Structures are given as structure tokens and as C-alpha cells.
Amino acid sequence: MHKTKITRRAAFIAGAGIAGMMMIGNAMAQSDADALGGPEAAASLDALYQQAISNGENKVVVYGGLAKAYKGVFDAFQARYPEIEVQTQIVFGAALFGRIGQEFTSGQHVADIVHVGATAMVPLLNADQIEPYAPEIAKVDPYWVGPDNAFVFSSLNVSGYFYNTDLVSDADRPTSWGELVGPDWTGKVGISDPTNPGGTAELFTTLMYGGVMTDDYLGKLKANDTKIDADWAPLVQTVLTGQRAVGVGPVYGMVNTAIQKGAPLKYNFPLDDANVLLPIGFAIIKNAPDMAAAKLLASWVFTPEAQALIGAAGFYGTHEGDLGTPEGLPPLSKVPNIVELPVLTERAGMQNAAREELTRLLK
């Protein structure tokens, strides 16, 4: 029988090849773990994934208004955990509260998670419709953690104002809220209606409680022939068509979408005197049909890979270390003069009171 003789050189090459493959495999595993926040975080997430599979959970249903903006984030989650599909339903405001309420009344639960801001999160919590869950891997400022660890905000929406670059040069742009009510900007400013519930109301509420928008300030804003549009979309058109040079209210992500399509707009952030960031988070609904899958998604959004994608989507990530930063904006740790409402859980009540005051002063 013929025997193949293996030389020392061949054995060395073969051994080196195996060792090289092992090194590549180890490097890939380490890279994977780093993307998830380290070996411990990766193991914790995998345990939730395996639990979801064991429970027969092949989906996670998310209610909210940010499905389009978060498409890249949700696609990455599905690529990481291919046995679980993210199913989104765009519903927010009164319709969201009504839908969740109906599911509790009927006992036929569909939603696993709501992906909403603080003014929507708190009423759901007060109605005892949220399953408390604060992921261990979430390392954030305590301000962004809900009461009794009920939820943790994973991202921040940049709120402020933008301008038409065909009408306003970078050198001439206003650099503070104070400048907007000066004589140079009379007849040049538009706002989305802050008396309606939503992001603009929260922006104005924050600046009012922060002492930036006083009664005197709002009086000047009205006297300056400020145009009030019903919502963000018509205001963007108002500024695009040159009816006004500056628009106050729409968040960075919405304006940036128009910019990416070639619109001559620029978001003015950060400002010299005050900056507002609106918190957004994933909260698990009580009796969620896909509880393990919901916990997996609510945890994974705090990983380095998810936070980077949140930044790419136009939001700041809340995890420590500036892991998620919107394109063209400074890291969160470098944003000056951030104005925050004093008590997170009172945002909805504060907004209602502010809207009444705004109606009196602006209408």
C-alpha cells in the first residue's frame, strides 16, 4: 500500500493554515462581540434570542411613528437575529392610545412594543399598560431611565429650527433663539403649530419651562408676523418655497431627509443659548405575545452597532460614549446648553399647560 510522506515543511504549512483559520475565527468572534458591547452583553442577548426561538416567537410587533426612519435599524436587527421578523405598524397619538386600549379590553394583544416619545410613554405607564424592563446593557444618564426602571430611552430627537440656504447664508443665520424675535427676522420666520400635541409642543414646552421662551418672547414672536403652519410637512414647504426663511419645529431627521433629496435647507444646531433633545424609547407592552423577542429588541438597541445606526438615522443615541451621532452634528457630549424638563414623568402635564398658555399668547 502506498503511503504519503508528509514532510516537516508540509506539516508546518498545514499547521499554520489551521492556526490562521482559528485566529481569523477568533478575530471575527471578538469583532462580533465588540459590536454587541462585549462578550457578556453578546451572551445575554443570545440567551434572549434562544429563549424567543424556544417559545416559538418568530416576530416582534412594534407600534409607533418612526418605522420609516428606523428601517435601517430594524433591518440590522433582523440580520443579526434572522429567526425574528420586526413587524411595524405606524400608529401614534390618540390612535395609538385607542389601539392599545382596545387590545387590553379585548384581551387580544398584538403589540409587543411601543416606540414613542416621553409624552406618549408616560400616559401608557400611568394606565398600567407597560411591562417594566430596563436592559442591563443600557448604560445611560439616569435622567433617561423611566420611573421604577419601567423603560429606558434609547435615542434623542434633535429639535430646533432650520433655514433656506438660498435665502440665508451661513454667516447671516441666527445662532440663538433670542435672535429669532429680533427686527432682522420680522416676516421671515414660520413655526409648526405648538398648540397641537406633538414634537413642536414639546419643544416650546421645554423652552418655556427652561426660561428661554418667556411671555415677552412669545409676544415678540407673534408681533414679528410669524407664520403658523398646522404641522411639520406644510412648514417645510413654506420654507422651501421662500414664504419664510426660517422654520421652527420639525426635527432634524425630517429636515435631513429633504436635504438628502437636494432641498436647499440646513438645520441650525447646536444653538448658542439653548438646545432641545426629545427622548424616544422602546417600551414593552404588558402581556406582549412575543415577550422574549421584545426584550431582545429593547436590549439590542443599546449595543454599539445599533446606536451607530440610530445616529445614521438622524438621532442621537443615549448610550454613554457618543456611540450614535447624526451626520454633520457634534457628538452628544459636545452639545452645549441642553435644556431638560425637571421631571421626566411630568412632561405630558407640562405640555398640556404650556399649550393652553401658547393658545392664549399666539392665537
Image (cartoon, grey):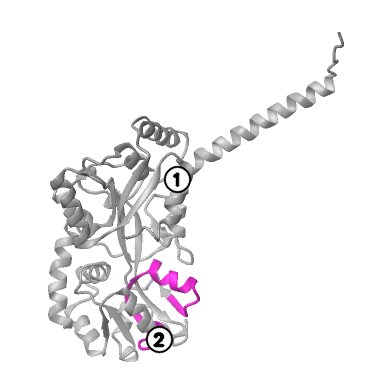
Provide the secondary structure element on which disc 1 rests. Answer: helix
Total residue callouts: 2
Disc 1: which residue = 78
> What's the amino acid at mark 2?
Thr
Q: Position of residue 277 (x, y in %)?
A: 32, 63
In this view, the residue in front, 175 or 66, is 66
The quadrant of the image that shows the N terminus is top right
> Which mark sits nearer the N-terminus, 2 or 1?
1
User: Local crowd at mark 1 within 10 Å, few (<14), some, or many (≥20)?
Assistant: some
Magenta residues span 240-266
Residue sitting farthest toward the top = 1
Provide the secondary structure element on which disc 2 rests. Answer: loop
| Displayed quadrant of residue 180 | bottom left
Q: Position of residue 15 (x, y in %)?
A: 74, 24
Q: Select label 2 or label 1 by which is in front.
A: 1
> What's the amino acid at mark 1?
Gln
Q: Is residue 261 magenta?
A: yes
Residue 233 placement, left or right of 119: right
The quadrant of the image that shows the C terminus is bottom left
In this view, the residue in front, 115 or 108, is 108
Q: Position of residue 291 (x, y in %)?
A: 29, 38
Q: Is residue 342 above or below residue 112?
A: below
